[in-house]
Image: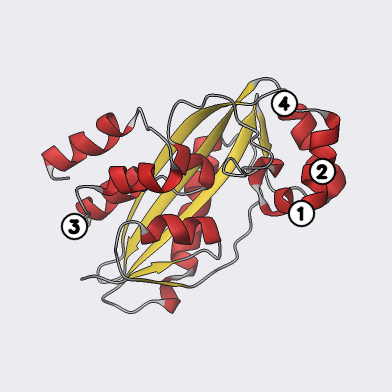
Amino acid sequence: MTSLILASNSPRRRDLLALGGWPFQVRAVQVDESAWAGETPAEYVRRLAQNKAQAAAHLAGSDEMVVAADTTVVDGDVILGKPADALEATAMLCRLRGHTHQVYSAVALLRLADRLLLSDVCTTQVPMRWYSDEEISAYVASGDPLDKAGAYAIQNRGFKPVLALSGCFANVMGLPLCHLGRLLLQAGVASPSDLPLACQDSLDYACDVFPQIWNHASRAGV
């Protein structure tokens, strides 16, 4: 079985990737995450995911593939990255509460044997509940928001920031698995047929979008 290199030190991406049963190693890389003028959110995350995959190429063997991802939170026309400090985390959470924003994640797959580079982007509409100032203060004090785009983790069971999500939960966590599975199939790597079920079981979430994303790709053999 082809071995994968995960170009990320995110424990959330590591846990999600493990659900596919592919053998992999973690090799984190750093790239410049500055947005370019006029760049759309989809273009932004795709570029960064591709850059991360290419930056990790020298860490992989010729028979391996690099998996990289990038996630950003978008509110209106503003890209919200990871907060620099507690003050910025508080401002982001205040900005997002009570309305819907978007999360964009890009996945890039680099096959080292021939330098084939594939990528895909997933977008999820994320409705936030109206959490109180006191809840924000307690959550920021926990430290959890400081390494998260948009200053929140959808899976945090204490804060529970999201209200009635419809769409890809794994995307909001940073690695849309069905999209990765499609890329691996295109690159000739088998993906388990029950990958969407494993994802839903792990996240305790009933996904309403995987039939369009995963089943079509599996039937087409792409």
**Residue named by callout 4:** 97
Q: In terms of sequence position, does the residue under pointer 2 or pointer 1 come before the other?
A: 2
Calculate the distance from the C-alpha at mark 3 to the C-alpha at mark 4.
40 Å
Residue 192, above or below 56: above
Q: Are marks 1 and 3 in contact (CB under 8 Å)?
A: no
Q: In terms of sequence position, does the residue under pointer 3 or pointer 4 come before the other?
A: 4
Residue type of the residue flagged with mark 4:
Arg
Calculate the distance from the C-alpha at mark 3 to the C-alpha at mark 2.
44 Å
| Local SS, label 1 | loop
Residue 35, above or below 6: above
Indicate the position of residue 183 as horizontal and vertical percent values: 28, 50
The part of the image, by quadrant, that contains residue 218 is top left
Calculate the distance from the C-alpha at mark 1 to the C-alpha at mark 4.
18 Å
Calculate the distance from the C-alpha at mark 1 to the C-alpha at mark 3.
38 Å
The part of the image, by quadrant, that contains residue 22 is bottom left
Q: Are marks 3 and 2 in contact (CB under 8 Å)?
A: no
- Residue 163 in view of the camera: yes
Q: Residue at x 59, y 25 (%)?
A: 163
The part of the image, by quadrant, that contains residue 5 is bottom left
- 143 or 53, which lies in front? 143
Q: In terms of sequence position, does the residue under pointer 1 or pointer 4 come before the other?
A: 4
Residue type of the residue flagged with mark 2:
Ala
Indicate the position of residue 18 as horizontal and vertical percent values: 38, 61
In this rendering, the label closer to the viewer, 1 or 3: 1
- 160 or 49, which lies in front? 160
In this rendering, the label closer to the viewer, 3 or 4: 4
**Residue named by callout 1:** 143
Q: Are marks 2 and 1 in contact (CB under 8 Å)?
A: no
**Residue named by callout 3:** 190
